[in-house]
Image (cartoon, rainbow, N blue to C red):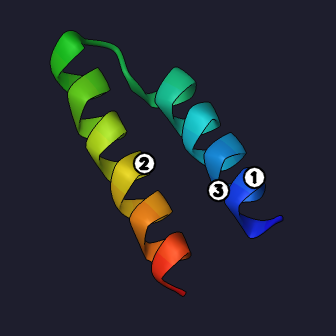
Amino acid sequence: MKFIAIVLAASACLLAGCNTVRGVGQDIQKAGGAIENAVKK
């Protein structure tokens, strides 16, 4: 259940926060890091 919440939060941040291609890449990296941390726990 936590995984789904993290994915939804990351998706919302990705859609709301990226204005450029560079911003998209940074957001994807942050989302990936958050997912990795959630899986490790």
Residue lying farthest to the right in this orientation: 1
Q: Residue at coordinates 75% horizontally, 56% vertically from top-left? A: 5
Q: Residue at coordinates 54% horizontally, 22% vertically from top-left? A: 15
- 8 in relation to 12, above or below: below
Location of residue 18 (image quadrant): top left
Q: Quadrant of the N terminus?
A: bottom right
Position of 39 with respect to 24 (left or right) is right
Alpha carbon separation for disc pair 3 and 1:
5 Å
Location of residue 6 (image quadrant): bottom right
Nearest the eye: 26 or 2? 2
Query: What SS does tag 1 mark?
Result: helix
Alpha carbon separation for disc pair 3 and 2:
8 Å
Position of 12 with respect to 38 (left or right) is right
Percent position (x, y) of residue 10?
Answer: 56, 44
Question: The residue under label 1 is which amino acid type?
Answer: Ile
Q: Which residue is mark 3?
A: 6
Q: Quadrant of the C terminus?
A: bottom right
Q: Is the Cβ of the residue at disc 3 closer than 8 Å to that at disc 1? A: yes
Question: The residue under label 2 is which amino acid type?
Answer: Ala
- 6 in relation to 40, above or below: above
Query: What SS does tag 2 mark?
Result: helix
Alpha carbon separation for disc pair 2 and 1:
12 Å
Query: What SS does tag 3 mark?
Result: helix
Position of 15 with respect to 34 (left or right) is right
Q: Which residue is mark 1?
A: 4
Looking at the rendered structure, the number of numbered marks drawn on it comes to 3
The dot on residue 31 is 2
Percent position (x, y) of residue 7?
Answer: 63, 46
**Mark 3 or mark 2, which has the lower sequence index?**
3
Question: The residue under label 3 is which amino acid type?
Answer: Ile
